[in-house]
Amino acid sequence: MPSVAFLEKVFLDRRASNSALRGVESFNLRLVRELCDLGVSTTLFVEPAWAGIVSRAAPGTKNLRVVQTDGRGSSLLAGLSAARNIRRMARGEGAFDALLLGNVANRLLPALWGLRAGRDFRRAVLVAHRETSPRFLRTIRNLPGRVVAVSEPVAAGFRNKGLMADVVVDYGVMGAEQFHPSERLRPADDPVRFCVIGALDNAWKGADTALAAFRLLPPDVRSRCELHLMAYRDPSSLHDDPGVFAYSWRNVGAVPDFLRGMDAMLVPSRDEDVMRETFSQSAVQGMLTGLPIVHSPIPVLAEKFDNGGGLCARTPEQFAAAMERLALDPALRARLGAEARATALARYVWNTERFARRHLLPST
């Protein structure tokens, strides 16, 4: 049975265990479960505060070994504790077939310095959900293995900083089959529903742009539209505009049905000093649901609509103009939605078996 040691910075951080599971953490927990289901013996290293969360997320999972670290509340020390355990296990059981790094993490660097390729693991694979730092790149440069980036802009960051070999792009939405167009016919007089999804308390998600665009719609168009914003920690703090609906955080299982009640998605994310949006799960979820997407021009979004499926907008005025076009033209919504879904199905559906075969354990 092939063996994998899984290191991920969030699972070694005690403070992060107090937050709701989002994005990368949910992805990695499901990745662990699916690797185990494929018959891969997976050892996951966690800060003790994460042990209960993992057991609830992966109840009764065969082939999973959860090892608690002794980091005394420090993710850096927890990483060093994990490295010591990997060395000990490799001496007693043989080297792991692969060391899987769940994301770029400078706090894992001391742990990586102490591990030896060939003795502790045979291959290293990094799933890069964000840009690398120069010192992280220097540390992994000589590891035998591969960087699997979530988007071309993230991959370009590795190549531009000097790591030219074995950087590939391969990523997508897990459980993509849950996201499909609604089969229910909506009454013709139903409002046209636009949505924004994400951690909207973060300014870079651009919910303010969406709200400003909605207010700029001509009154006769705005009266026929709704704007749904999901989600905020405290949605009651949002201005109470007619036709605007704000939500608190919901279980990820509620997102597919929520999207099937929408007509179009807005993705007004903006980069600031660093790349903020590195893939946009929500955009791809909307694409899979068959929604037309009005998106900002940042590269990680623009690359998803080179075959149609969306309208690009930069300012609130441009978002409002795109929203007006979609609100008044059901045929345009249907055409763009079909294009978006075709692109997402072809490019952005995650498959763990494919990941293991292509990248993680290609020779086993």
Image: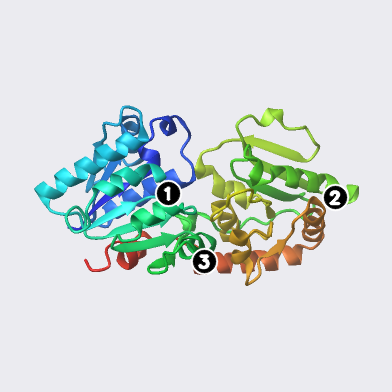
Query: x and y percent of residue 196 in the render?
Result: 66, 47
- SS class, disc 2: loop
Q: Is residue 227 above or below residue 34?
A: above
Q: Is residue 242 left or right of residue 137?
A: right
Q: Earlier in the sequence, mark 2 or mark 3?
A: 2
Q: Amino acid at mark 3?
A: Leu
Query: x and y percent of residue 205 in the render?
Result: 64, 46
Q: Is residue 130 left or right of residue 262?
A: left
Instruction: Kindly identify which residue carries mark 3.
Output: 345
Q: Is residue 73 left or right of residue 305?
A: left
Residue 1 is drawn in which quadrant?
A: bottom left
Distance Cα–Cα, label 2 vs label 3: 32 Å
Q: Within 10 angstroms of label 1, few (less than 14), some, or many (20 or more) residues?
A: some
Residue placed most toward the observer, 198 or 123: 123
- SS class, disc 3: helix
Number of on-image labels: 3
- SS class, disc 1: helix
Instruction: Kindly identify which residue carries mark 2.
Output: 217
Residue at screen point 63% across, 70% down: 306
Q: Earlier in the sequence, mark 1 or mark 2?
A: 1
Residue placed most toward the observer, 69 or 84: 84
Distance Cα–Cα, label 1 vs label 2: 37 Å
Q: Is residue 57 above or below residue 306?
A: above
Q: Does residue 223 show up?
A: no
Query: x and y percent of residue 284 in the render?
Result: 56, 58
Residue at screen point 72% across, 32% down: 238
Q: Amino acid at mark 1?
A: Phe
